[in-house]
Amino acid sequence: MVTGSASRTRAVLSARILILSLGVFLMIVPFAYMFATSLKPNALVLEIPPKLLPHPATTANYTAAWTSNKFGRYFLNSLGVAIATTFFSVWLSSMMAYAFARFSFPGRRILFGLLLIGLMVPTMMLIIPQFILAKNLGMLDSLSGLVFFYTGGTLALNTFLLRSFFQDIPRELEEAMVVDGAGPWKRYLKLVLPLSRPALATVGIFSFLASWDEFVWALTVINDPNKRTLPIAIALFQGEHSTSWGLVFAASSIAVVPVLLAFVIFQRQFISGLTTGALKA
Amino acid sequence: MTASSSSTSSTGLLGRSASALRLGGRTVQASKRKETLAAYTFLAPGFVLFSLVVLYPIARAFQISLYHWSIVPGTASQYIGLGNYGHALHDPIFWRALANTGAYMAFTVPAQIVLGMTVAVLLDARMPARGLFRTLYYLPVVTSWVVVSLLFRYMFITDGGLINFVVHDKLHLVGHNIEWLSHRWSALAVISILGIWKGIGWSMVIFLAALQTVPRELKEAAAVDGAKAWARFRAVSLPAILPVIAFVTVMLVIGGFNVFISIFLITNGGPLDETQVLLTYAYRQAFSFLDFGYGSSLSFMLTLIVFTLSIAQLRLFRRPKDVT
């Protein structure tokens, strides 16, 4: 009886793993195909049968992408914009979140309601008025203009997430500091921020990814080929050289691999931020 | 300030609270005013930027949608009231774009829920490599839309593409290579498959987190009772995570209205506007035909739909606190 149920449990477990593995196969094949293509000479990117292990394999696409096609420059553009956006967004949203989490002031409900509206509005809807605004502010075709709009666009979500983390910090800790005479800035800098490092990491990762991957806005406002970010560079390159798939996917891999690595390393922060929004809000 | 206040804190505390008691209301009021001021200082820089970049454009989008908008500097835009909205009602491509958006949701939302839930249920057990599985299913979620869109376009190429090789050359399901991207429904199918493939990991992670809040004793008690897996799931887990399913559904519907990059890069609405969705059509009107007014009216309608859904979801499915 006992051995019977044990072997049944084992059979169920094997079935689970088998089904999950089949699913994983479908999830992974496109990536494998992408990396394989990036290692193929151009003549073989549409060969029949398609090979997942390229033969002959070549890193020529990577060299070509990085050197003659300026993808190195686009990589640095993207990196700079993403780092600046992350810095400004985490800084500004943590201050806002602290105000919403810990202070009562006139207009608090209304301002928070406005923030929620910003959370709901589809970013694509704003692209026309934002384009006109950027034009009037002289921010078209500039990387710092990208940072400005990306930061503004990530504030609502980051503030919302950080506020819920900050509310979980025991009030007593702060009250103890008040008793010791610490003002709001000291509490924010010496208590709230250090205690929320995981939460700050979470919103930092979200902001970084959002601006690293952003496509439509950059495509719309950037004209100067030297100011392209990676996503528009990849998409435009594919449009201009529709058959250079090896090169397109070499550039894509350059853009995707850091993200995948970051995800694998910071997985815990990632998932916690995701489920906070879903299970708690 | 830090050094002196901390060294004298024990006496200082007594002295301060005593004086606060004596002075009564006025001190409380002064410190309250100070706190309010601090709160506004914390809010101001972020909220100004947020207002400029998000709130102001929302109002502006509506305003622009009421004009025959002139993009030439120095020439006046013509106020036409709801004319752009009326134009949409008589625009067959608008209706087709709306239908395509609906079709995309009809394909992708149920599939992401059912498949995401299946994977989550399979992973909700003591098993080896659980974290690895979760990571692998989640990889498409964190991959850029631009990259996966180009990748799917490449896989679905008619001659020499991976998919036609599998269904034609290998499995002989069809007698010739399919021109996936040249026809409305097959192109929408490709774009929907991409949406599902990219989205399963997200719904799975949310469902898995919700399932793990269902007490293990409950699940195991049902198992000992000999309840079959499906009946057990329906009786124990499903009711507990119903609010989360509702949340995921609304988020996926909203995501469906927002589909853009995949269409833009895979078919660009073609052939002949057959695969336009609301956002690609709005974008084309604005940035290819430079009709900012009409483009704004299209995206404003979409926003109204999304707002209604979001508010309905906040009202109806207010998350019970115990789910966390």
Image (spheres, coloured by chain):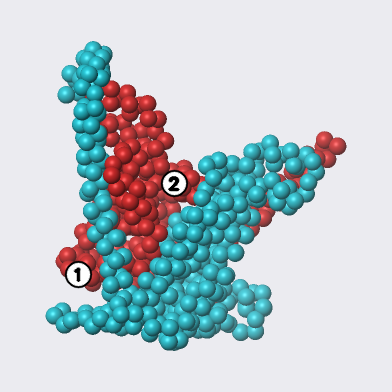
Chain colours: A red, B cyan
Where on the picture, by quarter, is residue A244? bottom left
Tell me which label, 1 or 2, sits earlier in the chain.
1
Q: Considering only vertical position in the picture, is A117 above or below A93?
A: below
Q: Which residue is mark 2?
A: A273
The chain that hosts pointer 2 is A
Q: For mark 2, does the 10 Å Cα neighbourhood hold few (<14), some (14 to 19), or many (20 or more) residues?
A: many
Q: Is residue B19 visible?
A: yes
Q: Is residue B102 above or below residue A100?
A: below
Task: In the rendered view, tell whether residue B11 sits above or below residue B249.
Answer: above
The kind of residue tagged 2 is Gly
Q: Position of residue B58 (x, y in %)?
A: 31, 65
Location of residue B15 in the rendering, given as x and y in whole percent from the top left corner:
22, 15
**In the image shown, does A132 or B319 lie closer to the viewer?**
B319
Q: Secondary structure at mark 2?
A: helix
- Disc 1 marks a residue whose amino acid type is Lys
State the residue at coordinates (62%, 78%): B168
Is disc 1 placed on a helix, strand or loop?
A: helix
